[in-house]
Structure formats: C-alpha cells, structure tokens
Amino acid sequence: MLGKIVLSGTEIKNNFFLQESSFFKKNHLFGFEQDLQNYIKQDKAIACLSSGTAAIHLALILAGVTKNDEVICQSFTFSASANPIVYQGAQPVFIDSEKETWNMCPIALEKAIKNRKEFGKKPKAIIVVHLYGIPANMEAITSIAKKYNISLIEDAAEALGSSYKNQKCGTFGDFGILSLNGNKIITTSGGGALVCATEKDKQKAVFLATQARDEAPHYQHSQIGYNYRMSNVLAGIGRGQMEVLDKNVALRRKNNEFYQKLFKGVKGITVFKEPSQDYFSNHWLSCVIIDASVTRFTNEDLRLHLEKDNIESRPLWKPMHLQPVFKDCLYFGTQVAETLFEKGLCLPSGSNLTDADRDRIENSIRSCLVSSI
C-alpha cells in the first residue's frame, strides 16, 4: 500500500508551475494560430510549427506524396521549397519562372504536367512560391491545378502580408506555407505555419508534428511522427510580432519605393515590383536586374562595390535545376530563371533601415554609377 505523499511548499509551487505552464502553452499557441487566421481573413485552419520547411514536409505528407512520386516545384527559389520532396523519397520536377512575377510560369507548368502524364507519371503535388514577396499568378496556377486535379502547395514563406486580387498569399492552395524565421517580415526567431483548408487537415498536421502519439494512457505510435510543433515561448513572441506586421510591411514597401526613385531614369537597371494592381507585395526583399551591356558593370561589380562600403547585398536565388544536388532532375521552361540569377541582386531591405542608412546606400550606389561612366 502506498503511503501518503506530503509535498513541501516548494514542491507544491513547482507542481503548480508545471500545470500553469501547460495552461499558458495552450493559450499562447492556439492564440497565435487564431491571430494568423484573423489576419489572413479566410476560413482556414492554421498549425504553428517549428519552421516553414516543416510545414512543406507535412503538406506533402497530407497531400499523399510518397516514395517515387513526382512533385512539381518552382526552380527559382530557396532550397527549402524543394528539399522536403526528397524527404518523402519523391522526385522534384522543376519549372521555370515567368518574366512578370519571377514566379512559376503557368505555360511551362502545364507543359510539364502533360509531359509527365504521357509517361504515366502524373505529378502528385505542385509547389508554387511567392518569391521576395511578389505574388505568383495564382489565377492561372490554381486553374491548372484544378484542371488536372493536383494538390497545390503555396509556399508563402516570403510573402506574409502580400496579396493577389485582395486575397492574402498562403490562402489559395490546398495548403499554404508561412515562415517566421529570423529574416522574415515578422519573426519568432525560428518558426513557421501550415495553412490548411480544413480543421481535419490541421488536426492531422498537429498529430504528425507531435510525434504521432496515439490516444492511449501509454506511449503508443502507429505511424512515424515528427518534432515539428512550435514552442510556447515562440508562440508568445509571435503574438507580439503580429502587432507590428502591417508596420513592417509598410517599411519594406518604403524601401522598395526608395530604390524605384533612386534608379528612375538609370538605363540598364530595373527594380523588381508588382506587374499590375492585382498584385500587392510586402517587398520582403527589394531586388534589381542589371544589364551589364548598358550599365558597364555587373550585379557582382555592384555587390563588391557595396561590400567595400560595408553594405551587404546578395545575388538572387540560384535556380534549383542548376544546383549540384538536383542536377539529374527534370526541368521545363526556357532560361528566365537562369537569367535572373545571372543579372539580379538583392539590396538592403530590412524593416529597421533608417534615413541615414538609405543615404549611405544611395551614396555608395551613385558612386558606382559615376565610376562606370
């Protein structure tokens, strides 16, 4: 027979703390998910996770992607858009960009689907990306996905706050991906979210993200799970960050307007911006394309010039079909993505840039322009 257990004051306090911590964990995490749902203004269910990459991985699982399946993916993107395809033992099929948005080309997309169907390999899912905060042509892409009955995964990791035809990015596909990494428009240091079309999909995602533990008094697992759930601390940070999201979007857009004004009338340099009023970008990063045959300097020349003045800039994403790890994958399109990589540059775009910072950037860029004459 067990004896009576007497807890000391400290033990009682610690025991209460554990219960209290569990209570607030539930409220912070669910509260942050509700904050995001309210922001996107769509009837969606959101699961907050450890990263945007984890969200893509779970989206592929929920879409039924398994070993030897094929998944169509935008080539001009960061590797995190494509890596989870391989986690599932599936094969990426890469698609070129269109010139207007730099995102997935609908023409090349449909060509790829028709080709794979001819070979008896209908793709299981499509991953489209809203690059640098500019929305993809979602009207055309969602139409194609529905036409061929293929799950659409919308990687909006760079596009929280962006919208297409007044609908928030991340809400068009069967699944949407958000990132809250340290370099994004708002951050929880590390984190992400999966936007689901139904509550059932969300609950399945949460189940998989918490080690797929079956309902039982003991630890029982009938399928493989993952440690992908967002922590209480990060969710609390996220709730605070939601209060500055619109402000940060406005600041990033201000940076883009600064570059548009700076390069206005400069031949050979084009600032990346929305192609029409249907598109609203958070301008997560402001980028330019440099035609060296006109400017007499390349994107790399400008990058090195800025670096001498202790100003960071970076080349655009190297397309996935050019990456050594994906060299054997299929690719459909022309050379739009390759040209963007060869000629493009990401300029300083942080929400915390001051007028003094912009003055220093302008002086450095103008000195580069003058020296090239």
Image (cartoon, rainbow, N blue to C red):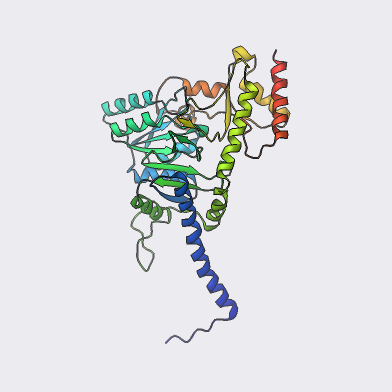
Q: How far across and how far down the image is residue 297, in percent?
A: 65, 17
Tally of marks: 0
Say which quarter of the image contains residue 119.
top left
Which residue is rendered at x = 42% and y = 87% of the image?
Answer: 1
User: Is residue 228 visible in the rendered structure shown here?
Assistant: no
Q: Which of 246 and 157 is in front in this view?
A: 246
Position of 198 relative to 141 (above/below): below
Which residue is rendered at x = 41% and y = 41% of the image?
Answer: 171
Q: How far across and how far down the image is residue 272, in percent?
A: 55, 26
| Residue 349 left/right relative to 215 | right
Q: How far across and how far down the image is residue 312, in percent?
A: 66, 32
- Location of the C terminus (image quadrant): top right
User: Is residue 209 visible in the rendered structure shown here?
Assistant: yes
Q: Which of 339 and 46 is in front in this view?
A: 46
Q: Nearer the viewer, residue 101 or 181?
A: 101
Which residue is rendered at x = 67% and y = 37% of the image?
Answer: 353
Q: How far across and how far down the image is residue 339, in percent?
A: 51, 20
Position of 126 relative to 41 (above/below): above
